[in-house]
Amino acid sequence: MNLMTVLLQAAPAAPGGSNMMWILLIAMFAIMYFFMIRPQNKKQKEIANFRKSLQVNQKVITAGGIHGVIKEINDNDVILEIASNVKIRIDKNSVFAAAADANSSNQTAK
């Protein structure tokens, strides 16, 4: 009971500290936006534009790591030839990158 009366009678925090808290909160959100959210949105737009520009006979890599050549493009899926006379139907959203782009980035990393 004694502790409760001490806590209730404690002086309220200074009003200037509250303003500083809001400034820090807004600054943290701005930093998160520019370093995390904005680059992720930019990357998603690049991938969406790539998927819209898919062409027949283009070498691609799927999200699962399968390398193949596009043989047919439909509205929601793609027919991918992964070996001689071996074709699979995959969702268009699982096409991740052009094989030429992946090969050039691997060679620059070495």
Image (tube, helix red, strand yellow):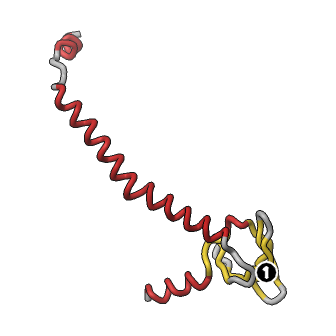
Residue type at the position of mark 1: Lys
At x 48%, y 89%, the residue is 107
Position above or below: 68 against 19: below
Label 1, residues with CA under 10 Å away: few <14, some 14-19, many ≥20: some
x and y percentages locating residue 53 in the rendered image: 66, 73
Position above or below: 50 against 17: below
Q: Would you name the residue on which mark 1 appears?
A: 71
x and y percentages locating residue 74 in the rendered image: 80, 68
Indicate left or right for 107 with 74 as reference.
left
For residue 66, which quarter of the picture? bottom right
**Residue placed furthest toward the right:** 85
Indicate left or right for 38 with 91 as reference.
left
At x 55%, y 67%, the residue is 46
| Quarter containing the C terminus | bottom left
x and y percentages locating residue 41 in the rendered image: 50, 58
| Quarter containing the N terminus | top left
Label 1, secondary structure: give it: strand
